[in-house]
Image: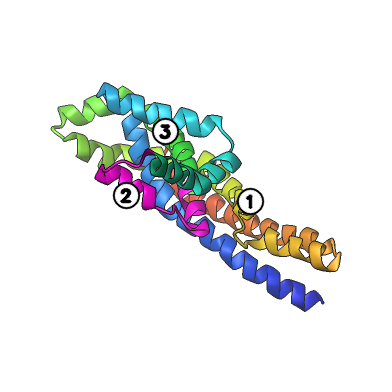
Amino acid sequence: MFWTVTSSLLEGFAKTVEIFGLTLLFAIPLGLVIAFGSMSRIAPIKWVSKTLVWIIRGTPLLLQLIVVFYGPGLIAAAAQDLNSSNAIIQWVATWTGFDRFTAVIVAFVINYACYFSEIYRGGIESISKGQYEACQVLGMTKTQTFFRVILFQVIKRIIPPMGNEIITLVKDTSLARTIAVYEIVWNAQSFIKFNGLLWPLLYSGLFYLIFSGLLTVVFGKIEKKMDYFKS
């Protein structure tokens, strides 16, 4: 039974790692875009970015998962009731929404991008204006200033909070079971339902501990490597 449970949990853990990896792949760059939007001097862009961050940070990820998965179906049903000849409304009425796994990725990416954006914004705004002015005096463009002078200092400062959010993501992947995505906790719970066994659920916690421990070590090493970027 132990090897049967382990095999099932490893299968679920593979899905957990897939959710984790895809979320980071898309959320890290999207978070930077949202951060620039929040700092934009163009009022509409700034307002949209800040409103999005406010909504996402102010509502549970669990609720966001449900909205992303079930929301399109509800909107499509409402569009069908309109019975309009408008091409856009007709397209919405025929859209069936995201599949379960895609809905998980969309919800996680948007959620973590918003949290990452605030970390980016805090890191960028923590750099003294004197450095920007010095680069301007030297004739550097804004792009050169950011990528050659500011970026690595920002990375140094945001590694601890980013590491914390990324480790939180490892545990948040368990919420995917809410819309029946078969990650590790879902597989562990199936043994309670069909075999009356509780220990597989406790055993699944070991996978999270090991994964989080490895990430902690990785971020610790990254912090040490970035020690020469001190200000």
Residue at which label 1 appears:
178
- Please tell me which residue is depicted at 59% across the width and 59% down the height of the picture: 181
Task: Give the distance between the C-alpha atoms of the residues marked 3 and 1, in whole angstroms.
Answer: 34 Å
Give the magenta part as a residue range: 82-107
Tell me which corner region of the image, top left, top right, bottom left or bottom right, holds residue 209: bottom right
Single out the mark in the foreground, 3 or 1. Answer: 1
Determine whether 26 is above or below 85 in the image.
below
Split into 4 quadrants, where in the image is the N terminus? bottom right
Q: Amino acid under label 2?
A: Trp
Q: Amino acid under label 1?
A: Thr
Characterize the local packing of mark 1: few (<14), some (14-19) or many (20 or more) Cα atoms within 10 angstroms.
some
Give the secondary structure at mark 3. Answer: helix
- Please tell me which residue is depicted at 43% across the width and 40% down the height of the picture: 78
First-in-chain label (1 vs 2): 2
Give the secondary structure at mark 1. Answer: helix
Which label belongs to residue 91? 2
Residue at which label 3 appears:
123
Give the secondary structure at mark 2. Answer: helix
Characterize the local packing of mark 3: few (<14), some (14-19) or many (20 or more) Cα atoms within 10 angstroms.
some
Q: Where does the image place residue 191, in percent across and percent down from the top left?
A: 79, 66
Tell me which corner region of the image, top left, top right, bottom left or bottom right, holds residue 196: bottom right
Q: Where does the image place residue 174, in percent across and percent down from the top left?
A: 64, 53
Between 145 and 96, the one nearer to me in the picture: 96
Q: Main secondary structure of the magenta part?
A: helix
Q: Where does the image place residue 71, in percent across and percent down from the top left?
A: 49, 43
Task: Give the distance between the C-alpha atoms of the residues marked 3 and 2, in whole angstroms.
Answer: 42 Å
Q: In the picture provided, is 57 more to the left or to the right than 88? A: right
Q: Amino acid under label 3?
A: Gly
Between 166 and 157, the one nearer to me in the picture: 166
